[in-house]
Image: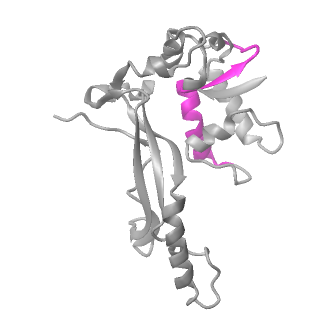
Amino acid sequence: MEKLARWTAVKKEDLRKVEDPFFAVSIIRDNLKSRGYVREVYGVTDLLKECGLYYSSVSLVGDQIDRALRPVASGEWMLIKDEPFKPINIEENWYARICNRQNDGDHLINTVSEMSGPGKWKITSMHVNKFASSAAFVANFLVSRGDEGRVFLSSGKDFANTTRTVTQEWVPLNAEERNFSLSSAIHRYGMERKITQIYVEADDAWDVSGSSWHWRPVIANEEYELKQK
């Protein structure tokens, strides 16, 4: 049995079944490249969703796979197996070390709430505000009726003024990001913040026309925050 789980869902007694991140990355990479031909590892869909990747396409391109593998490489997402090739090193991996400090049977949330440190904001979920957006959709539909021959929802303007809420969580820096720790803001790990985005036509230096329809404010999958001087 193989299962991919976020560190907050891993119990202390499961750590002996957690694969070392180096080998976990290799296993999940092969699974992502072979999707549609092999049985999917349980939890992969949740990982992709957290990374802003959705399983609607037939295959993922290289940079998308790399993005999905970063949380696996850091230990933020753990691969649980009945017989891991090499169990994760509890002392060397931050996430495993915190999991090991839990009380037996308890989940990590109580431990995390007591710890603060440098880190980054990572998107964990995105939800469309259905009630507010429904009014915008109705208005956009009425406007679209004036565009003869155009199918509704075929253009970005049909989604104008819809809104969604993005949830970010404060997580530790990866090993290769530790040089940023001295200038990083300090927050409690596991702390969440929510940001409301609106879908609008705005300036876009990457678009040939100079503008495009997109969510504002723009939010990266991972964002760093500098400490205030």
Relative to 33, does residue 116 appear above or below in the rendering? above
Image quadrant in which the N terminus is located: top right
Looking at the picture, the colour scheme in use is one colour
Residue 33 percent location from the top left of the image: 72, 41
Whole-percent x, y for residue 132 in the image: 48, 63
The question of residue 84 being in magenta is answered with: yes
Q: Quadrant of the C terminus?
A: top left
| Vertical placement of residue 147 versus 74, above or below | below
Q: Residue at x 59, y 24 (%)?
A: 9
Above or below, 158 against 121 in this view is below
Task: Identify the residue at image location x=53%, y=51%.
Answer: 127
Residue drawn 54% across the image and 27% down it: 76
Residue 21 makes an appearance in the image: yes
What's the residue at 35%, 38% (across, down)?
224
Give the image location of residue 104, x and y in percent.
Answer: 58, 8
* Percent of width and height locating residue 138: 55, 75
Q: Which residues are magenta?
A: 60-86
Residue placed farthest to the front in the image?
131
> How many numbered dots are placed on residues in this image?
0
Q: Residue furthest left?
A: 229
Instruction: Depth check: give the residue in front, 21 or 226.
Output: 226
Residue 225: name its quadrant: top left
Above or below 71: residue 141 = below
Q: Is residue 159 visible?
A: no
Residue 66 left/right relative to 42: left
The foreground one among 7 and 72 is 7
Q: Is residue 68 magenta?
A: yes
Tell me if 208 is positioned left or right of 87 in this view: left
